[in-house]
Image (spheres, helix red, strand yellow):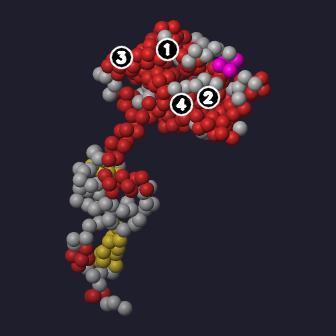
Amino acid sequence: MVAEDELPTTATIAETRKGFPSIGAVGADSPCPGSRLLPDVPIHSRKGVLGRRRNLVSPPSARVLLRRCFGSLGENRQVTDGLPNVQNGTFRLVDAAWNEFVYGGHFLALGDALTLWALGLVAGIPVTWDFLVIVYLCVFAANLYNRKTEAEHDTLGNGVRVKVMAKYDRAFVPITVVSLGIVIFLLLRFANIAVLLFAAVVFGISILYTAVLKPLTKYVVGFKSYVAAFFYALMVPLMATYYGQRIGWAVLLVFVFYFVRIFISNAACDIKDTESDGKRGLKTLAVYFGNEKAARILRIVSLLSAIPIVVGIYLGALPLFAAAILLTVVYAYYYLMPNHAADNETLTALIIDGEFLFWLPLVLIGRAFL
């Protein structure tokens, strides 16, 4: 047993620890931190304070730990709520690129371009790169205008998106002009004036709703979702016209299916905006029926959306592999389940809008095996 006179004093322990950095320290001079630690806790004895021990708390996630380690290299960091706030560097760049892709409208535009490619395969229309670029730029420009116009009302449910879109304030006109200029050039280069006029009508519907028709949502339940669905679904007959295909049963059935799927997606996105839409008097499904009942209605509509594809396969208007696209019905049923409906911005941006990224892989897999 060690005698009390031989026990180390606080000064001795401090001298011993001198030069060894605390693994829980967060600062410009600290090494890559390990587990977050609570403040030192004194250990008492009859002779006084012997030293200090540290209490461990749950270790941070891998993402947080990596962000701390790599973010500490050559950077000036500030501590906010106990975590380092990375001012510059790789992670800030990655975060900015991710937010731009998801909340800047590129994620949505890419999903719709790939969806039209998938629907072209189902309807027997050979889709080429030029039409995909046209769809991408049209959807991007339309959403850019809508989100810029609605920015003041989106703060409650779309805070991150509002911040991302704020940087487009000065560049809005140049970006829109360049995007539409490329669209016009491609339409004239690969199609004709008639198709250009058709495309102008499709694009004009989205602009007309945002600029003029949106107040009708105060009187017609779900009007916003109907218009959005009509805008996107019109891309199907536009695609057929662009490639000189006749608008037969295959195109009509795919049009109806796409219309219903977009309606479900748009109405589901409104669930997170119930508070802001309610204050504005907009009768979305979520505002009119309540979140839970609206989600229940959308689950039923989602099941019914399979009818056009099933009928098309039965009549021989659509190929058998078109059945693979019906897995999106199961996917939508998942995000519309109670306590999992679109009640936050990330869920909306990634899961609901992300549904359309799966259409092309599903169709390609179905075509390979069915």
Q: CA distance from mark 1 to mark 4?
A: 20 Å
Residue 121 circle label: 2
* Dot 3 amino acid type: Val
Characterize the local packing of mark 2: few (<14), some (14-19) or many (20 or more) Cα atoms within 10 angstroms: many
In percent of width and height, residue 215 lies at 51, 11
Q: CA distance from mark 3 to mark 1?
A: 20 Å
Separation of residues labelled 2 and 4 (CA atoms): 11 Å
85, above or below 143, in the image: below
Number of on-image labels: 4
| Residue occupying the point 27% across, 88% down | 5
Q: Which residue is mark 1?
A: 191
Sequence-first disc among 1 and 4? 4
Separation of marks 3 and 2 at Cα, in angstroms: 31 Å
Residue 21 occupies quadrant: bottom left
Q: Position of residue 140 (x, y in %)?
A: 44, 24
Is label 4 in a helix, a strand or a loop? helix
Crowding at mark 4 (Cα within 10 Å: few <14, some 14-19, many 20+):
many
Q: Amino acid at mark 4?
A: Leu
Q: Are marks 3 and 2 in contact (CB under 8 Å)?
A: no
